[in-house]
Image (tube, rainbow, N blue to C red):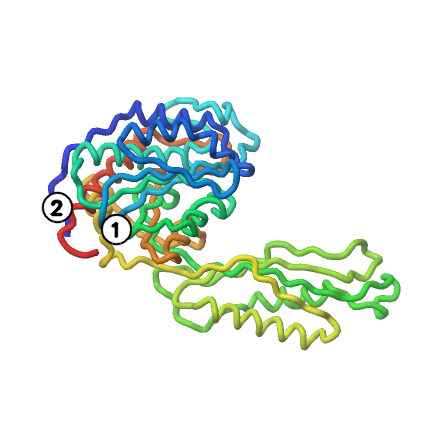
């Protein structure tokens, strides 16, 4: 249960504009990332609001910044990321020179994820003004490497011992929509080894592509006979790439296919893997001369938050209601850094200040008023979270 009283919060719009603009001017395209270039700015802004700042750099130049304040429990983290995708073409402005126009900030990373990162920074600042003696601990994290899998980012932090009770990740969803669940992923490659021969005499060889063509066709019927969680869409199978062969007149001795399966609860990773093995065995029986090899590339498990029992999401929902937001909950087939946190035993959900998805696109922007609104929402959430009268 949370307080029904709406506290007064001071959110400085110009500070948000300036901080976002300064971050956009630092090119953190990933690869290579170069998030270390943000060190002076992040240290300055985090310390300005009273945070103790430390860095973790698993490899040179890939810097994670961790601001911390408070002590004891409960602990909550607000986690954004500094890296961006490449700018690409089609821009009307310089993507690394923040441009203010019609109430928006244009630039690469404005929406994904430098703007939202500044929104949580402004929220922590506003919260600390209202509640300087709060009981618990806040972590404000500016992570690296989110755009290419977080191997050097939040995953590295977790391996290094990062642990909180719960986290809010401002990197998915919309201003009126929170992401509370994510499908699991099973991404794999299947290699087929055959025997090369002249195209005029294919019977002298063993075509490595044909067994994979059979497998691909069979996978169109892939599924798990199980009633799925009503909050999720059905299991999906995507044939991402196929490669093999050197010329039309040569029997290919090697081919490879990459497959991506997204599966909802209560389907388990073991069930998906068993089904893949069954399809592989079926293909092997059909083509006994072929040698098939299965390689796992990436796996994760599905999750969903029980919103009725979660202290942070309840605080978030109450705050959204106070601000007149008709909050909705959704799940996604994509994976965010929330997935890594959940798999490490923490509770996490996502939200975004955006109203439409413009990240990774030319002329990426963020609406200034929405950043201010999000900062207010996150600050109220912290107030309610640390004044929660029951629950964990």
Mark 2 element type: loop
* Left or right, residue 231 beside residue 156: left
- Label 2 packing within 10 angstroms: few (<14), some (14-19), many (20+): some
Residue closer to the observer: 111 or 158: 158
Q: Residue furthest bottom?
A: 285
Please rate how many residues cluster around mark 1, counting C-alpha atoms within 10 Å: few if below 14, some from 14 to 19, many from 20: many
- Could you say where residue 114 lies in the image, as x and y percent from the top left? 40, 34
The image quarter containing residue 227 is bottom left
In percent of the image, x 31 and y 50: which residue is there?
A: 164
Q: Examine the rendering and report whether any part of residue 55 can be seen.
A: yes
Residue 238 at x, y = what percent? Answer: 55, 58
Earlier residue among tags 1 and 2:
2
Q: Is residue 71 above or below residue 198?
A: above
Residue 245, above or below 55:
below
Measured as percent of width and height from the top left, residue 212 is found at 67, 65
Please give the residue where the numbered disc 2 appears in the rendered image: 3
Residue at figure coordinates x 52%, y 45% from the top left: 148
Q: Which residue, given by chain and number where applicable, does mark 1 sit on?
A: 313
Q: Contact, CB < 8 Å: mark 1 with mark 2?
A: no
């Amino acid at each position: 249960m949370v307080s029904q009283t709406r506290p007064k919060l001071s959110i400085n719009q110009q500070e948000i504009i300036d901080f976002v603009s300064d971050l956009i001017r630092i090119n953190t395209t990933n690869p290579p990332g170069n998030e270390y270039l943000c060190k002076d700015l992040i240290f300055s802004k985090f310390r300005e609001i009273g945070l103790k700042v430390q860095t973790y750099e698993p490899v040179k130049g890939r810097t994670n910044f961790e601001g911390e304040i408070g002590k004891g429990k409960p602990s909550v983290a607000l986690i954004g990321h500094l890296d961006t995708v490449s700018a690409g073409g089609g821009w009307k402005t310089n993507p690394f020179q923040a441009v203010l126009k019609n109430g928006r900030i244009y630039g690469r990373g404005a929406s994904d994820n430098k703007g939202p990162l500044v929104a949580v920074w402004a929220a922590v600042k506003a919260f600390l003004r209202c509640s300087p003696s709060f009981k618990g601990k806040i972590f404000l994290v500016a992570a690296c490497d989110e755009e290419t899998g977080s191997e050097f980012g939040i995953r590295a932090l977790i391996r290094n011992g990062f642990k909180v009770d719960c986290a809010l990740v401002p990197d998915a969803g919309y201003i009126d929509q929170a992401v509370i669940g994510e499908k699991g992923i099973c991404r794999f490659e299947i290699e087929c080894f055959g025997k090369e021969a002249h195209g005029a005499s294919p019977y002298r060889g063993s075509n490595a592509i044909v067994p994979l063509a059979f497998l691909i066709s069979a996978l169109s019927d892939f599924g798990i006979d199980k009633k799925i969680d009503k909050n999720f869409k059905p299991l999906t199978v995507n044939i991402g790439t196929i490669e093999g062969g050197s010329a039309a007149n040569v029997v290919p001795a090697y081919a490879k296919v990459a497959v991506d399966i997204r599966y909802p609860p209560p389907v388990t990773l073991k069930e998906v893997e068993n089904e893949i093995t069954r399809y592989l065995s079926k293909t092997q029986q059909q083509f006994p001369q072929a040698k098939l090899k299965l390689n796992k590339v990436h796996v994760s498990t599905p999750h969903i938050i029980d919103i009725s029992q979660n202290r942070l999401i309840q605080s978030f929902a109450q705050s959204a209601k106070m601000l007149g937001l008709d909050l909705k909950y959704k799940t996604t087939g994509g994976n965010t850094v929330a997935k890594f946190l959940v798999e490490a035993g923490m509770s996490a959900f996502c939200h975004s200040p955006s109203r439409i998805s413009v990240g990774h696109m030319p002329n990426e922007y963020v609406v200034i008023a929405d950043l201010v609104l999000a900062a207010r929402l996150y600050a109220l959430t912290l107030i309610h979270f640390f004044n929660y009268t029951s629950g964990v």
